[in-house]
Image: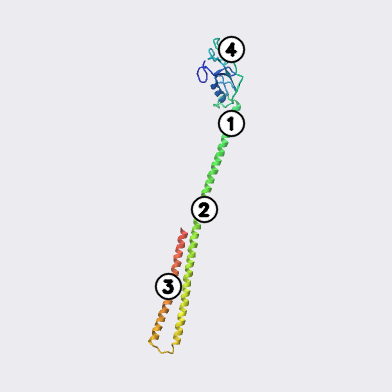
Amino acid sequence: MTCAICLEDLLRDHAALPCGHVFHFACIEQLITRFGRCALCRVRTKRIIPLFIDGPLIGISHHSSSTLDNASIAPSTRGHISASPYEGEGVTAILESPNDDEVSSSDRADLNGLHENNQALTQRLLVAERKLIQMRQVLYRTKVELRDMQQQFNAAEIQNLHSRQMATVSYRQYNGIAKEKILLKQHILRFTERVLCSANDNQTPDFMEGIRKELQELQKIIRRPQALAQTLERSRVTGRVNSISVRQA
């Protein structure tokens, strides 16, 4: 006699189901755990009855009635068949084929419930992925805005520093012009006093030479403010060009 599951001879570790069919204990245990049905008659059951037989089963065959009775056991069978007091309790499993006509309504309900749960989890996953994409977009825009703000701040700092430098240079130049004007007025005053004091003196060559030197010195002093003013104007133009370049950058 062979096991209908593994197609090997039933030599040891036998087990029977309440329907009477005999298999290897390991084979029928896996089948009942997974499907909850007999491999031959498809009767639903959870019970596995271990058989204790001293030797191979001889003269036992699977009849069309799908039952195991005493008449199917030959007299030459050595030993006896007894049921273990332990009755294994399997776990009802869902059949692999949901289209089987013998699948119970409870199994179909379980399948439908699992399918609905799977769809719900899929929808939640899609929603979470969309939110993650939106958060990444917001993060990217924030980084771009921060970068632009930093560039504007740096440009403003450079312009402010340049403005302060230009203000310092302008102050020094205007201060120099003011000093030159004061010096010019002092020279004019001294020259006028000298001319008035020497009006009644003889017109000697020394006096004329002194007058000539005073005039030369006055011309130099007069040219200084003009040169400073030209330098200041060039500095202003250069500062405007630099400011425009900084803004464009």
Q: Which residue is mark 1?
A: 112
- Looking at the picture, how far across and down is residue 162, in whole percent? 48, 63
43 left or right, relative to 228: right
Mark 2 or mark 1: name the one nearer the start of the chain. Answer: 1
Name the residue carrying label 4: 70
Is the C-beta separation of discs 4 and 2 under 8 Å?
no
Q: Residues within 10 Å of mark 3 (few under 14, many from 20)?
A: few
Which numbered disc, 1 or 3, marks the residue closer to the eye? 3
Label 4 or label 2, whichever lies nearer to me, is 4
SS class of the residue under badge 4? helix
Q: Position of residue 221 (x, y in %)?
A: 43, 77
Please identify the quarter of the rendering in which residue 81 is found: top right
CA separation, marks 3 and 4?
A: 136 Å
Q: Secondary structure at mark 1?
A: helix
Tag 1 and tag 4, C-beta contact below 8 Å = no
Where is 155 relative to 37, above or below?
Answer: below
Please tell me which of labels 2 and 3 falls first in the chain: 2
Q: Could you say where residue 49 lies in the image, as x and y percent from the top left?
A: 59, 19
Residue 227, disc:
3
